[in-house]
Image (spheres, helix red, strand yellow):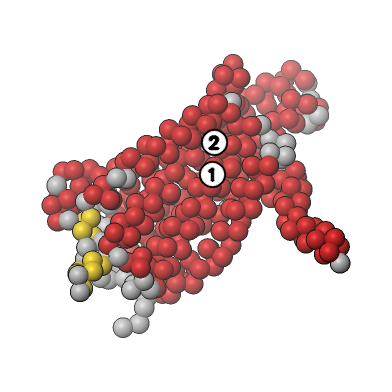
Amino acid sequence: MALPTIRHVSIVFYPILAAFGVPANLLTMVVLFRGNCGLSKCISLYMAFMAMADLLVMIVSVIAYHIVMYQFPKSFLSYTSVCKFVLYFNSTSLQTSVWYTVLFTADRFVAICFQKLKMKYCTARTAVAGIITVSLLMHLQNVPYLLEYKPVRVVNGIQWGSQPSSWFLTSLVGVAFSFLQSILTVILPFVLITLFNCLTVRRILLASKLRRGLRGHSSQTQKDPKMESRRKSIILLFSVSGSFILLWLTAAVSFLTTRLTATAHYDGDYTDSAYVATEAGDMLMYLSSCTNACIYTATQAKFREELRLVLKYPWTLFLKLVTKHG
């Protein structure tokens, strides 16, 4: 039977995504950890760990899960013991990436809207504490992936595949776990990031109106040093969070119209509209894990400079070695 169009699209989409996303996030990590981008320490930490989490999403969720396990079902990743770890890290890496974005958005929200709390909250120490807390919580709440999954089949004593046990699917614990996964991965982060951005926009509009009134002319506001110093931070915030909202919108709507209405089962019909919407939402959701590198390059001049230095370094080192031994 011929594959449906959405499956053909996904077969092509995920390898292209991985080919771009892995080097893009790796380079972003290197540039940000160098700490020469002119950003505050807490922003650099959030952005660096967001890139690290996105890199794990590319490796585990895109390459291991959607490419190798789907295209090569007899690979070692399909052994039950390995498969459970892939499922565990697939969920953990995605949730960690999402919640790092929430932390970044919350940090910028506080910095812009609550100046008195900025010095206390928007620090490297708070960033590290938030990153560690989110990482631990996401790893702990995904433990059922390691405990409650069983093999799909056993061939010559070797366990293949992984599926939740029947009692887990029908039990209150299993239903609660599935619902919690969807809430923590899609709905709650989407709502929080949208809320933080709406409140931030409201604050900016009120502040701009007030400052225009104090200075008398809107043309002079453009020369306001304080507003200029905040402009790049605001552009960065809205670019990162706005990209997240747009790319996760389909996944959020799909969740609300399928799982919450008990229509998430397709019975093998890959042309079903709910299945197509879910698959499209997943592809856009994973795409969001490689857009930040493009955003940083487009909006941050010092990031572009550092990126050029990092890209030129191997060639510079090679030329030095050739010259030295030539």
Instruction: Look at mark 2 in the image and give the residue it sits on.
Output: 104
For the residue labelled by badge 2, is the local secondary structure a helix, a strand or a loop? helix
Residue depth check, mark 1 versus mark 2: number of the one nearer the observer: 1
- Of label 1 and label 2, which has the lower sequence position? 1
Q: In the rendered view, would you say 194 is above or below 2?
A: above
Residue at 65% over, 24% down = 207
* Identity, as a three-letter code, of the amino acid under mark 1: Met
Q: Are marks 1 and 2 in contact (CB under 8 Å)?
A: yes
* Quadrant that contains the C terminus: bottom right
User: Residue 173 at x, y = what percent?
Assistant: 18, 43
Which one is in front, 175 or 112?
A: 175
User: Residue 195 at x, y = what percent?
Assistant: 47, 34
Kindly give the residue lying farthest to the front in the view shown: 325
Which one is in front, 278 or 77?
A: 77
* Quadrant that contains the N terminus: bottom left
Any mark on residue 50, and which? 1
Horizontal side of residue 20 vs 64, given as left or right: right
Q: Tell me if I can see residue 141 in this picture.
A: yes
Q: Which quarter of the picture shows residue 48? A: top right
Crowd rating for badge 2 (residues with CA inside 10 Å; few <14, some 14–19, many 20+)? many
Q: Which quarter of the picture shows residue 258? A: bottom left
Which one is in front, 215 or 178?
A: 178
* Identity, as a three-letter code, of the amino acid under mark 2: Phe
Any mark on residue 224, and which? none
